[in-house]
Image (cartoon, helix red, strand yellow):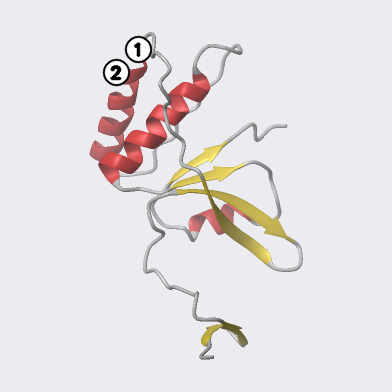
Amino acid sequence: MNSTIVSSGNTYRLYDSAVKTHEVLPVGTYQIDFSPLSGYSLNRIDDLKVGDEHVYGDHPRLVKRVLRTYRTGSRSLGLLMSGEKGMGKSLMLRMTAEETQRELGLPVIIVKKNSPGIAEFIDTIAEAIVVFDEFEK
């Protein structure tokens, strides 16, 4: 069996033939995981999608506005969604993630908890949509 050898600094790891390398993170949805022993990793999870639910209000217009602002901007774009339960924050997030992946070809990264050095890890990912989900909890 042939191994793929991956080095990082002075550390070499051997992997089986299932290992694939990528120049950029493939479009998809990932969750950041952290282990004090092995550090950070991204685990592929199901994409955030809008189901067959009915969309009320200005959500479609707001999603288009977010994408337009992102396309025309020259720096990072932040979007804070807050409010009472049932206002549609999760739906808006799913709509934005789905359209971002489809129209811009960007991966979505979900951050559920704080850990040491998380900002530095996120900086290494390159261009992506980063969602801090219930981060304050």
Which of the numbered marks, if any, corresponds to residue 58?
1
18 in relation to 52, above or below: below
Question: Where is residue 89 drawn, in percent x and y?
Answer: 51, 20
Which residue is located at x 44 percent, y 73 percent? 20
* Within-10-Å neighbours for mark 2: few <14, some 14–19, many 20+: few
Q: Position of residue 49 (x, y in %)?
A: 43, 33
Left or right, 17 with respect to 36, comes to left
The answer to whether the residue labelled 1 contacts the one labelled 2, judged by CB atoms less than 8 Å apart, is yes
The front one of 93 and 50 is: 50
**Which disc number belongs to residue 103?**
none
- Circle 2 residue: 61
Amino acid marked by disc 2: Arg
Residue 6 x/y as whole percent: 53, 83
Quarter of the image holding residue 42? bottom right
Quarter of the image holding residue 66? top left
What residue type is disc 1 on?
Asp
- The percent coordinates of residue 7 (x first, y second) are 55, 84
The quadrant the C terminus occupies is: top right
SS assignment at label 2 = helix
Residue at 70% of width from left, 51% of height from top? Answer: 115
Q: Which element is circle 1 on?
A: loop
